[in-house]
Amino acid sequence: MLKLMKYEFRKWRVTLLALLAGLAGLELGFIAGVKLEKPQLMIVCLSLIMVLTFAAFAYLVIAGIAGYSQELREKCGYLIFMAPVRSISIVLSKLLFIALVALAATALFGTAGWLDARYLLARSHLDAQTLDSLNAMLRFGLKTDATVQQILQMAGFSAASVLLEVLLTMC
């Protein structure tokens, strides 16, 4: 199955590199805002990182499902299942690849946004009530007293629910 996933990775590498380049550009913009002491630039870049997180997840899942569907509808689509590999392995490798890439991209972009948001909030000296309101709105672990265990637990539950949603969407 890993060999089949390798071929999926080769097919998706340009898309994944484009998403990583977008994240790198936004992170550079955030760092430039920090160095130049321009909070507006930091907020714009942070907002775009958060939007990119959700957009990347949605795009990867939808494009993955659409790509698989298109492969089956093409004239040579039947050849996919003529390979000397079990059909279930082919289908599972495609579904697992899409789920893992979507989760990895979401985790990477979400972590970058979370770290930037924590830095921005620590730098802006917000009072505790405003910070609690932001935390309740975003449910993002922005509390300054949140432990690593609480953050990892929240991330684990989020990842499990996202994986379940992706698999239910594809099946």
Image: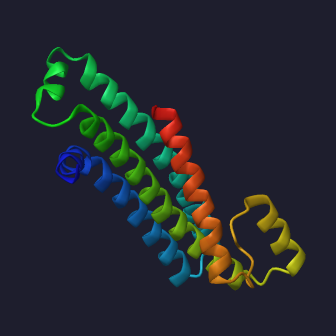
The residue depicted at 30 percent of the width and 40 percent of the height is 94
* Above or below 85: residue 51: below
Q: Is residue 21 visible?
A: yes
Residue 39: name its quadrant: bottom right
Q: Nearer the viewer, residue 17 or 45?
A: 17
Q: Residue furthest left?
A: 84
The residue depicted at 42 percent of the width and 48 percent of the height is 99
Could you tell me residue 60's position as x and y percent?
41, 43
* Above or below 118: residue 43: above
Could you tell me residue 56's position as x and y percent?
46, 48
Residue 138: name its quadrant: bottom right
Q: Is residue 122 left or right of residue 38?
A: right
Could you tell me residue 54's position as x and y percent?
55, 49
| Numbered circles on residues, count | 0
Q: Residue furthest right?
A: 129
How is this picture coloured?
A: rainbow
Q: Nearer the viewer, residue 36 or 19?
A: 19
* Above or below 170: residue 164: below
Q: Is residue 39 left or right of residue 171?
A: right
Could you tell me residue 113's position as x and y percent?
56, 67
Q: Is residue 126 left or right of residue 52?
A: right
The residue depicted at 32 percent of the width and 40 percent of the height is 92
Q: Nearer the viewer, residue 26 or 170?
A: 170
* Above or below 94: residue 78: above
Q: Is residue 117 visible?
A: no
Residue 110: name its quadrant: bottom right
The residue depicted at 12 percent of the width and 26 percent of the height is 82
